[in-house]
Amino acid sequence: MFDNLQTRLGEIFRRLSGRGALKPEDVDAALREVRMALLEADVHFTVARDFVARVREAAVGQEIWKSLSPAQQVIKIVHEELARTLGGVHRELRFAPKPPTVLMLVGLHGTGKTTTAAKLAHLLRRRGRNPLLVATDLRRPAAVQQLEVVGRAAGVATFSQPGADDPVAVARAALAQAARAGHDVVIIDSAGRLHLDEELMAELARMREAVAPTEVLLTLDAMTGQDAVTMAEQFTARVGVDGLILTKLDGDARGGAALSVVAVTGRPILFAGVGERVEALEPFHPDRMASRILGMGDVLTLIEKAEATMSAEAAATLERKLRRGEWTLSDFVEQLRQVRTMGPLDQLVEMIPGLGGRLKGAPTVDERQLARVEAMINSMTPEERRTPALLNGSRRRRIARGAGVTVQEVNRLLKQFEEAKALVRQMEELGKRGKRLPKGGLGWPSRSD
């Protein structure tokens, strides 16, 4: 989402870095460009103005032009102020001291409220909670059925009352059901509208009073720009909002909403939706998002994704196989599956410091090619996966037919697998000797292959 802003800021800072010593007027000129970049990204004009003023004040206070690396000091200040604009520090979801915790999701139609409810339930279930999804949007056609469908995809229970016409009564009944069934979190998918209206606001205010939610969470479509900011102001003033969830942060909009809503509403962003899958909801960390915007990557989130995908026991088993040279094509395809469950590969690349920016416009890892690799390995017998040396010409032709690929692609896969094994052995040997690791990759297939 922040590609354009990231590119503009990167150009500004590269020009600053090329000048060496900086004068106050150099910083002023750069900050004017930063302000224009923020406005072009659809950041609210007061937020952009205040942001630049704070950066200028900090730069003057630190007398950055007298430092040994003034351009780096400017980037450091901008990073700190970006994180501050985005909320400063990560705020965890609050839980009631006595279950159940009631989370009430509000928002307009089209913001992804219902799917976000399921994503949040899935995330909490993975954290050991027992959530219950509640359908109280009784006016939108098929809204109840949609929640039931996404609830099944998330692996969580749902509650609805067919034929009901009072959403507040449904919410009360859901709390009673949660107490009986032992659900410690109740997630209420409230009603929405295409536009803000008095009836919606009155209904949501009545529901809030009736169920006393631990958190009221507003879902905002990050691709709607300034409209999202206006909507956030209205919901905060009329219903009361405790936190925000930004959806569609993986889209191609300019991203100004993310940089504006916290400053305008004073409410923190708790989560960000980064895809369609039920797993595609991430805790929102202002400092990490600031690093992404500035092209610095996000290693901590990448590590968390990897830890969530592979258990410590599985990682130890993999390491043992690698050390003993027992890594097979079955292990190879399992690693591919785990990488794919971490999210879109382009997003993962962006989290690697310095790599995402360098690869813009270059051939990248193609997820479709990974699927083809998986199909080829699945077309092999267990014995062939354990011992690739058995794969003579006729066997390779059979595998190619089974996977719907060419023999050349099968040959390329086997070559990449052997190169990966050789590289792992080199890394192990060099690690024992304390030498630097060789340059190169693990042979992941790319669009250029």
Image (cartoon, grey):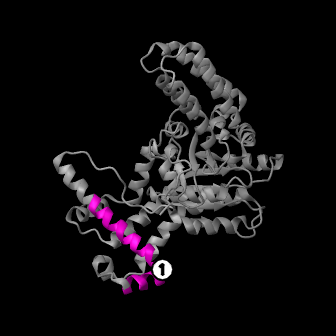
Going by the numbered disc 1, the residue's amino acid type is Ala
Closer to the camera, 252 or 366? 366
Closer to the camera, 357 or 264? 357
Q: Is residue 183 magenta?
A: no
Tell me where residue 285 appears, x and y as whole percent. Answer: 51, 40
Q: Quadrant of residue 335?
A: bottom left
Relative to 355, say whether 444 is above or below. below
Residue designated by label 1: 403
Q: How many marks?
A: 1
Q: Is residue 403 magenta?
A: yes
Question: For the residue labelled by badge 1, is the local secondary structure a helix, a strand or a loop?
Answer: helix
The outermost residue toward the right is 198
Relative to 364, say whether 405 is above or below. below
Q: Is residue 204 left or right of residue 449?
A: right
Is residue 62 something one can see in this rendering? no
What is the crowding at mark 1: few (fewer than 14 residues within 10 Å), some, or many (at least 20)?
some
Tell me where residue 420 appears, x and y as whole percent. Answer: 32, 62
Q: Quadrant of residue 23?
A: top right
Q: Residue at x 53, y 67 (%)?
A: 368
Tell me where the magenta segment starts and ends, as one range.
Answer: 394-423
Q: Residue at x 72, y 64 (%)?
A: 143
Q: Is residue 174 left or right of residue 342?
A: right
